[in-house]
Image (cartoon, coloured by chain):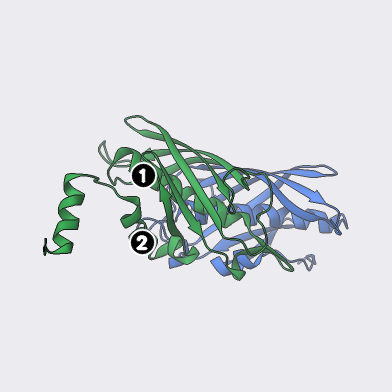
Amino acid sequence: MAEHPDIALLTPYARSLGIELSEWEDGVPVMQVEFVEAVEGRPEHFHGGATGGLLETAGYAALRAELAERERDAVLKPINITVQYLSAGKSQASFAKGRVTKLGRRSANLTVEAWQDDRTRPIATAVMNVFMGEPED
Amino acid sequence: MAGNRTLSALSTMSEQAAFDPKTATPFLTSRGHPGFLGMRYSDHGNDWVELELPWREDLIGDEGQHVLASGPILSLMDMASGLAIWKAMDKFQAIATLDLRVDYVRPAREGAAVFGRSQCYRITRSAAFVRGLAHDGDVDDPVAHIQAVFMKIGGGPKRELPGG
């Protein structure tokens, strides 16, 4: 196993929701959340907001990993997120992994995918833009 | 009149508003994800609903900075949008989020409750369209803007629907 950067992948909000690191895959963290009451919307299904929170967390985690690899430090601030809900999130664990589509100097563009038991059938995808400020900003 | 308040409330509901956001919100936010976030009713109009997300230390987006994470704002807007749609339809029907865009125009103030106000501006046979904003006290100085599309569930042939 390759060494992975010792970076904070979870915000207090993400920890509070029950999101955790599932595994590292090609240097990118895969995040997961079990189906618990905190993520439930209509009975036995994920709430759209919880799925959005998982996608966003996986997006930030992928960006933090990429920045750590390049030994860059930045304060991340959200610009926007667009979530596409593709199928209902059922009462089982959900996973999400992000990809840094473009890493600029001041902003990054990310694409994120969330899935459950069948990775070839994502339950939701997201596109995010994140502002990267100077650490003392 | 010394009438039974519960009965009179029920009869008022069935004769007039079939969906009242003020009475429905406590039920809808009593458990699950909305319950976890602790959302509360704030205000509503004919086609819009505003919910409040009280400040909570464990929902921040960054250690050291007392600023609400963006995730709870997304959830708040998703929930306010659902209520706005039910208010505009004047009935409760299962719906699922299809597409949701959030622009975070500025961070919420430290320690501030955030309010999510969403308006349903168009309903078709199968879809509902909403737009809205989140603010931390002044509706003219929003922290976020949103736009979303929801699908109605049920009525047609059973199939797998997007959502949450």
User: What amino acid is labelled 1 in the image?
Assistant: Ile
- Asked which secondary structure carries label 1, the reply is strand
Disc 1 and disc 2 on one polypeptide chain: yes
Is residue B162 at all visible to an observer of this figure? no
Relative depth, front residue between A114 and B66: B66
Q: Which chain is green?
A: B
Rendered colour, chain A? blue
Neighbor class of circle 2 (other Cα within 10 Å; few <14, some 14-19, many 20+) is some
Q: Residue at 67% of width from left, 62% of height from top?
A: B110
Chain of the residue where label 1 is placed in the rendered structure: B
The residue wearing badge 2 is B26
Q: Residue at 49% of width from left, 46% of height from top?
A: B117
Q: Residue at 51% of width from left, 57% of height from top?
A: A50
Neighbor class of circle 1 (other Cα within 10 Å; few <14, some 14-19, many 20+) is many
Percent of width and height locating residue B29? 40, 61
User: What amino acid is labelled 2 in the image?
Assistant: Pro
The residue wearing badge 1 is B95
Percent of width and height locating residue B41? 42, 56
Numbered tag placed on residue B68 in the rendering = none
- Quarter of the image with the N terminus of chain A is bottom right
- Please give left or right for residue A122 compared with residue A65 in the image: left
Q: CA distance from mark 1 to mark 2?
A: 19 Å
Chain of the residue where label 2 is placed in the rendered structure: B
Query: In the figure, B126 relative to A28: above or below?
Result: above
Residue B145 lies in quadrant = top right
Is residue B25 at all visible to an observer of this figure? yes
Residue B48 lies in quadrant = top left
Percent of width and height locating residue B124? 35, 29
